[in-house]
């Protein structure tokens, strides 16, 4: 089961990351998350950024996004992600 989750989440991560990283810098900043979630408050975007940015460098890498998606898919009831993250994954994930 875990390997299936990792495979699926890797596909999700790739698709989501490419859609969000419009300037092709290889990481996501708070501004990019804010643009993707335009109807979410700046405070919620900042919280999501803090949750996703595991190393504290103010950037979300594909790997950090991947880890968050794995957590969310494997334990959706206990994963510490916001509804904004769930919406981001649902909206920007594979068609």
Image (cartoon, grey):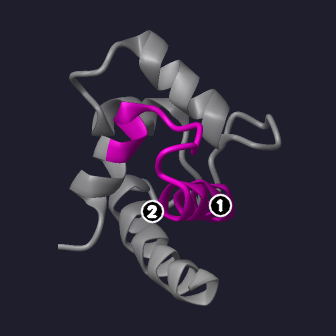
For the residue pair 33 and 25, the one nearer the viewer reads as 33
Mark 2 Cα within 10 Å, few/some/many (few <14, many 20+)? many
The C terminus appears in which quarter of the rendering?
Answer: bottom left
Q: Residue at x 67, y 64 (%)?
A: 63
Mark 1 residue crowding within 10 angstroms, few (<14) / some (14–19) / many (20+): some
For label 1, the residue is: 67
Q: Which residues are magenta?
A: 62-86
Percent position of residue 86, x then y: 36, 45
Q: Is residue 20 above or below residue 77?
A: below
Q: Is residue 21 left or right of residue 92?
A: right
Secondary structure state at the residue bearing disc 1: helix
Mark sitting earlier along the chain (2/1): 2
- Decide whether residue 66 is among the magenta residues: yes
Secondary structure beneath label 2: helix
**Percent position of residue 43, x then y:** 47, 11
Name the residue carrying label 2.
17
Residue 76 numbered mark, or none: none
Where in the figure is residue 32, as x and y percent of width and height? 42, 39
Q: For residue 41, what is the image quadrant?
A: top left
């Amino acid at each position: 089961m875990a390997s299936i989750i990792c495979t699926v989440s890797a596909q999700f991560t790739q698709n989501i990351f490419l859609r969000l990283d419009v300037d092709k810098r290889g990481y996501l900043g708070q501004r990019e998350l804010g643009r993707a979630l335009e109807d979410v408050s700046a405070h919620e975007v900042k919280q999501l950024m803090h949750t996703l940015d595991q190393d504290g460098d103010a950037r979300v890498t594909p790997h950090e996004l991947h880890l968050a998606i794995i957590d969310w898919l494997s334990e959706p009831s206990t994963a510490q992600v916001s509804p904004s993250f769930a919406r981001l994954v649902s909206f920007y994930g594979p068609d």
